[in-house]
Image (spheres, rainbow, N blue to C red):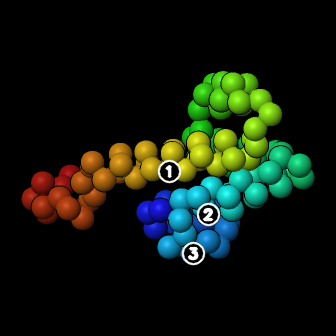
């Protein structure tokens, strides 16, 4: 798994996962944490999902279509996909450091 994705997840959830974690291990670790939040602190999970910008409609649809499956795992995959999407979007725009001085506002 891309170290940047793991770093974002560590930051967003306060986890300490190694940068070199595999995608499957990242899903498993994140799913376990999410399942813990589902059972013990659902409001905190909702705040995380809102801050990460998980599409509520898509989440509801996926959970409904996959009833009986591990909800934590479904949510973990959505979070990872969203973080990958954010990284791709950010990489397509130059940062302020990449703009020549005479072109800055």
Residue 82 shows up from this direction: yes
Q: Is residue 27 above or below residue 15?
A: above
Mark 2 element type: helix
Tell me which numbered mark, 2 or 3, is placed earlier along the sequence: 3
Q: Check disc 2 and report the residue beneath it.
A: 25
Q: Check disc 3 and report the residue beneath it.
A: 18
Q: Is residue 90 above or below residue 78?
A: below
Residue 47 shows up from this direction: no
Disc 1 and disc 3: Cα gap in Å?
17 Å
Query: Residue extending furthest left?
Result: 102
Mark 1 element type: helix
The circle drawn on residue 83 is 1
Q: Is residue 36 left or right of residue 9?
A: right
Residue 89 coordinates in the image, percent (x, y): 35, 45
Decide: few, some or many residues near mark 2? Use Cα within 10 Å; few <14, some 14-19, many ≥20.
few
Q: Quadrant of residue 29?
A: bottom right
Decide: few, some or many residues near mark 3? Use Cα within 10 Å; few <14, some 14-19, many ≥20.
few
Residue 8 coordinates in the image, percent (x, y): 53, 61
Q: Is residue 31 left or right of residue 10?
A: right
Disc 2 and disc 3: Cα gap in Å?
10 Å
Residue 23 coordinates in the image, percent (x, y): 54, 59
Q: Which one is closest to the eye, mark 2 or mark 1?
A: 2
Tell me which numbered mark, 1 or 3, is placed earlier along the sequence: 3
Mark 3 element type: loop
Query: Looking at the image, which is closer to me, 3 or 68?
Result: 68
Tell me which numbered mark, 2 or 1, is placed earlier along the sequence: 2
Q: Which one is closest to the eye, mark 1 or mark 3?
A: 3
- Residue ID at (24%, 64%): 97
Query: Looking at the image, which is closer to me, 11 or 99?
Result: 11
- Residue ID at (76%, 43%): 70
């Amino acid at each position: 798994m891309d170290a940047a994705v793991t770093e974002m997840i560590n930051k967003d959830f306060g986890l300490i996962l190694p940068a070199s974690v595999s995608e499957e291990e990242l899903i498993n670790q994140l799913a376990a944490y999410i399942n813990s939040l589902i059972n013990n602190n659902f409001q905190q999970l909702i705040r995380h999902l809102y801050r990460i910008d998980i599409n509520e409609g898509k989440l509801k649809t996926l959970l409904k279509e996959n009833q009986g499956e591990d909800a934590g795992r479904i949510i973990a995959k959505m979070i990872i996909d969203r973080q990958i999407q954010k990284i791709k979007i950010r990489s397509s725009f130059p940062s302020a450091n990449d703009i020549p001085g005479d072109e800055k506002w």
